[in-house]
Every structure is written in C-alpha cells, then in structure tokens.
Amino acid sequence: MRVIKSRLAELDIQLAYDDFGAGQARLVELAEAPPDYLKFDRALIEGIDQAADSRQRLLEGLANMAIELGIALIAEGVENAAETTVCEAMGFEYGQGYHLGRPVSGDTLAT
C-alpha cells in the first residue's frame, strides 16, 4: 500500500478511502498509507445528532484519530442541519447528503 501511495503522490493524485466504518475499518492502512480523504460510512453519520453518547464518542474518536494523521474527513449521508452541526463540531471538513445538495445527472454537470 505504501508503494501505491508513493506512486500516486508522484503523479499528483490524491487517495480517498470510502465507506470507512462499514465492515473492516482498515485501521492498519490508516497508519501505514494514510489517505488524503476519509469518507465515513453513512451508518456512522445518520442520526448522529440524536445518537447515544457512546456512538457520538466513537465517531469523534475515529475522527480525531484521522485528523491527527492529517486526513481530511468526509461525512456521508448528511440529511439535516443538526447532523451537519455535529459533524462540523467533530472536525468534518466535507459532507455528502440530501441536506447539502441533491444528486444531479452527468448531463446536468456538462451544461
């Protein structure tokens, strides 16, 4: 993984890990070949504003770990303002979800 990360850097290509927190968390990869961006799975983000303290602490701990490694955070599945507020407070720089914008087709992007 380090070789791939090094080669991508040579090509000025950034690396992102998707669906972090779903299935295998790839914690070892975070330390050995940290990505430029880490997109947290929607299962961790949905309802985070109303989630139990233990779930909020888990997400915040994972976010802090990634931030300390210099990784930019992306929250997937942001559906309301309250989730946005909580994610921003935890250090998420980017978000994806209906609250932030509806999907558009490729044809719309081309015009």
Image (cartoon, rainbow, N blue to C red):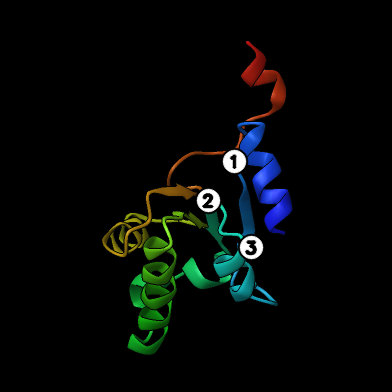
Amino acid identity at mark 3 = Asp
Residue furthest top in the image? 111
Task: Please report the residue visible at 32 percent of the width from the left and 59 percent of the height from the top.
Answer: 91
N-term mark: 3 or 2: 3
Task: Please report the residue visible at 41 percent of the width from the left and 71 percent of the height from the top.
Answer: 65
Is the residue 109 above or below the residue 66 in the image?
above
Q: Report the quarter where the C terminus lies.
A: top right
Is the residue 55 above or below the residue 97 in the image?
below
Spatial CA distance of label 3 from label 2 is: 11 Å
Disc 3 element:
strand
The residue where tag 3 is placed is 19
Q: Determine whether label 3 and label 1 are within 8 Å by CB.
A: no
Amino acid identity at mark 1 = Gln
Task: Please report the residue visible at 62 percent of the width from the left and 47 percent of the height from the top.
Answer: 15
Disc 1 element:
loop
Is the residue 50 above or below the residue 17 in the image?
below
Q: Report the quarter where the N terminus lies.
A: bottom right
N-term mark: 3 or 1: 1
Q: Quadrant of residue 25?
A: bottom right
**Callout 2 environment at 10 Å: few (<14), some (14 to 19), or many (20+)?**
some
Residue 39 in the image, given as x and y percentages of width and height: 55, 57
Q: Nearer the viewer, mark 3 or mark 2?
A: 2
Q: Determine whether label 2 and label 1 are within 8 Å by CB.
A: yes
Q: Residue 61 versus residue 97: which sits nearer the camera?
A: 61
The residue where tag 2 is placed is 37
Residue 21 in the image, given as x and y percentages of width and height: 59, 73
Relative to residue 65, is residue 17 drawn left or right? right
> Residue 14 shows which numbered tag?
1
**Callout 1 environment at 10 Å: few (<14), some (14 to 19), or many (20+)?**
few
